[in-house]
Amino acid sequence: MTKRKERIDRGIKVRSDGIYALNSYREILYLAFPRLLPVVGLLAVVPFFSLYWQEVIASTAIYALLAVSWELLYMTGLISLGQSLFYGVGAYIAGALNASWGFPIYLTVPIATVGGGLLCALMLLPVLRLRGIYFAMVTLVLPLMFSRLVEATRILGGTNGLTGIDSFPNHWISFCLIQIALLVAFFGFRRLEGSDYGLVIKGINDNDRAIMSSGINIYWYKTQVLFLAGAVGCFAGAYGAHHDMFAGMPGFALDYSILPIAAAAVGGMGSFAGPLLGAFILVPLSEILRALGALRIVFYGLFLVFAVVGLPEGLFHFIRRKYEQIERWVEVDK
Amino acid sequence: MRTDSLLTVSNVSKHFGGVVAVNGVTFKLKKGEVIGIIGPNGSGKTTLVNIITGFIRPDKGKIFFKGKDITGCPPYTITDMGIARTFQMIRPFYQLPAYKNLIPSLFSPRVRRLVGGKYGDRDAVAMDILEEVGFERDSSVPYKDARNLPHGYLKRLELGRCIALRPEVIILDELFSGMSIAEVTSTVPIIEKLRDEGIAIVMIEHRLLELFQITGHVLVLNFGRKIAEGTPEEVMNAPEVKEAYLGSEDVAKEEIGC
Ligand SMILES: Nc1ncnc2c1ncn2[C@@H]1O[C@H](COP(=O)(O)OP(=O)(O)O)[C@@H](O)[C@H]1O
Ligand SMILES: [Mg+2]
């Protein structure tokens, strides 16, 4: 006698994908619970945290924005090793508009978001034909180049950065802005993914030949995706600049590039919830580990290794499986 | 001169390293016409298709579609103009249900332009097209993921992808290979119907019996060169053709396959 794990989908009658026949409140709750969790969590629970932890969650949201932006690119087959490009560009645009030209916040943030998205898409346009690691290399190099450029030419405040940037009028506006932006980006991207547009961009990733043979210009679509991902990342940067009242070379630092990827690896790639979840584990964890002093990075690294080795599919996919399927051991005859 | 032909392939050549894959091939395709292209394996048929559809740029020669030079245009532009193709080496979207495989085509700028902006329900249109290419509508087959479908269905899915584009020219690269006899027999009328609707078709095929049933205009490639063109009888009796197939008799028997 041997045993085998049997998996059964929970009893939601699925007619075709996306169309559910809901029969009871239980089923509605079953579907709504995971979707409501981030909304309720961010907007109703976190406000009761201490000010310190609210700030941690705000900075987590910045990384989470960069992580969902990363995931959108990944879905399209564009591997980004340089999310900090988006953060830095967004921060500098908002910072310069505000500190140097006196634009108010309600203009700097939208301009940095849209203009920064366009700028990033334009910068990456020449390398859009490169695939895989070649594209990745360019994204890695661009933010490094930018920070050296700022250092060498002393534009945009040089190594000192731009200071004297307006902060948000009060803590609650700042807090709500970043949480709502994160929810909009997250649910917006999810919606996009489920649409025919999403089907096409995922198709570009795994079969660009067939997409081209459908008369679809894959480079135009990749440009659009770069704009969307760039805009979300630039928003994070613009927010960060006003939040910290500072925009400078640290905006192009590796942290903003590596953490989104680590978040996606821990949380699970292939869905937007994975990187989001990953960011909400990694950033607070790094705060908790501050108590360990110098050993912090060691424990942080160990956690990353264990998470990725232990759950290579990513935490989100693991939880999702547990939630959607009943598992039991059944005996099978030899 | 070019005006009466829909697609003109003019003196096209392409070499890969030392191999001359296509060597000075010329032919014309009129509206509503079917041209069969036959030839031993490695004679340059797929390369020719790749050149016409923009996946490969020819070393020499030009392609005209409706009088316009399309040589060197990218594949999506050529498809957008109205030339659809199937792939000999199929690569469907394996993790998508069969009917979802047609969505990119139905979502394309070409189709959106032709239907005037909005398609009500792309999924419904996809189901109609799948039925047209022989997917049983009331079964679970159209909803199955492509990775779980037999090869014959995937080949017909390729054809469906072409039909979805509402093209003026369809190029079929060995559509019948990998299909069962029954599938081939049921696919022939689909192609005949497309032909009768006025779609021009280039059909690369090893199954000569069915090919000759569909068209009376055949051209033969060997080592990248066009060695004969005409009716099936003319072509099969041409000394060059006999020699080409005799040169590799086993392959020839297998390829003629009837
Ligand atoms: N991408 C390529 N690189 C190098 N050689 C190729 C390539 N594609 C085709 N060939 C060669 O060109 C010749 C014609 O191939 P192909 O067009 O696939 O023939 P067919 O479709 O008639 O079987 C063959 O000798 C093949 O090896
Ligand atoms: Mg071939």
Image (cartoon, rainbow, N blue to C red):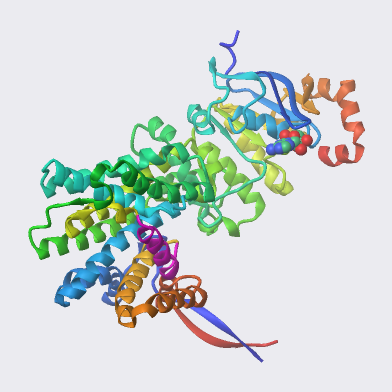
Mainly helix, strand or loop, the magenta region?
helix
Counting every numbered tag in the picture gives 0
Ligand 2: quadrant of the figure:
top right
- Which residue ends up furthest to the bottom in the rendered image? A1
Instruction: Describe residue A309's horizontal placement relative to residue B88 as left or right.
Output: left
Q: Is residue A49 magenta?
A: no
Instruction: Describe residue B257's horizontal placement relative to residue A321 as left or right.
Output: right
Taking the spot 32% from the left edge, 69% from the top edge, the residue there is A22
When asked about the image quadrant of residue A300, the answer is bottom left
Residue A30, position in %: x, y?
Answer: 32, 74
- Which residue ends up furthest to the top in the rendered image? B1
Instruction: Describe residue B157's horizontal placement relative to residue A78 as left or right.
Output: right
Taking A204 as reference, is B57 above or below it?
Answer: above
Q: Is residue B210 visible?
A: no
Residue A79, position in %: x, y?
Answer: 47, 53
When asked about the image quadrant of residue B232, the answer is top right
Residue B122, position in %: x, y?
Answer: 40, 45
Q: Looking at the image, which is closer to me, A192 or B106? A: A192
Taking B199 as reference, is A303 above or below it?
Answer: below
Q: Is residue B232 visible?
A: yes
The segment highlighted magenta reads: A253-269
Taking the spot 48% from the left edge, 78% from the top edge, the residue there is A306
Q: Looking at the image, which is closer to me, A110 or B191? A: A110
Residue B219, position in %: x, y?
Answer: 75, 24
